[in-house]
Image (cartoon, rainbow, N blue to C red):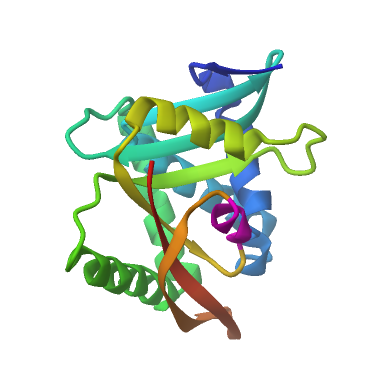
Amino acid sequence: MLTIRPLNPSDYQEAIQFAIEGMQFDQYLTNRWARQIYGRYFFYEALNQATQVIAAYYNTQLVGLLLARINGEKTVHQSRWQQGIVRSGNWLSRTFFANSSDVYEQTNQQLLQAYQADHHPDGEIIFLAAKPNSRIKGIGTFLLDELTRREKGKEIYLFTDSFCTYQFYEHRGFKRFASKEITLSINKRQIPMTAMLFVKKL
């Protein structure tokens, strides 16, 4: 049976692997060391912003994690050491991704600004990942249901792209507000993708 429990710090590395595999970081970084550094950066940046940390366990095994930032709520976790990892990740982005990380971030902000012109969202899902190749079904839905129970009636958004399983959100009532075609230049490779903004009232 799936249960919601406090996220155990000993499971941080497992959550990082969820992100690396589920979000296909190998599409951007062929170097394994670089993927691990970037995965830590991605996870710790989200964790240090989160006001809701929702961890799904099967028995004692972490199988899914949702991190959300809700306006007006206090962050759950802050760590100077992890903030150092985030700074290292910023350096890695500048070194390996050149201007691509700026293109990606600027595109997301453009999509969000267009949305905020007529809407006032209450928060953002900043991390949602399940154990890759798990035989357990419904982990992502289980996490979203818990967020809905905690934050019912609030309007949230999330950023995703065509390298992620964005169809998961479409099947669970999220609406694609806007999208934009972009191309990332990474290690002399041109990587086309679609950046997307999804929204939903919980």
**Quick check: 158 left or right of 28?**
left
In the rendered image, residue 40, in percent from the top left (x then y), is placed at: 51, 43
In the rendered image, residue 84, in percent from the top left (x then y), is placed at: 35, 41
**Quick check: 174 left or right of 35?**
left
The number of numbered badges drawn on the structure is 0
Q: Nearer the viewer, residue 66 or 120?
A: 120
The answer to whether residue 2 is above or below residue 72 is above
The answer to whether residue 90 is above or below residue 53 is below
The answer to whether residue 174 is above or below residue 7 is below
Q: Is residue 40 visible?
A: no
Q: Nearer the viewer, residue 86 or 49?
A: 49
Q: Is residue 141 visible?
A: yes
Quadrant location of the C terminus?
top left
State yes or no: residue 4 in magenta.
Answer: no
Q: Specify the farthest residue to the right.
A: 135
Q: Nearer the viewer, residue 84 or 66?
A: 66
Write the residue at 60% across / 39% down.
140
Write the residue at 60% across / 54% down.
171
Q: Nearer the viewer, residue 69 or 154?
A: 154
The answer to whether residue 165 is above or below residue 152 is below
**Quick check: 71 left or right of 146?**
left
Which stretch did the figure color magenta? 164-171
In the rendered image, residue 63, in percent from the top left (x then y), is placed at: 67, 30
Write the residue at 47% across / 72% down.
195
Quadrant location of the N terminus?
top right
Write the residue at 47% across / 44% down.
127
In the rendered image, residue 201, in percent from the top left (x then y), is placed at: 35, 46
Residue 93's quadrant in the figure?
A: bottom left
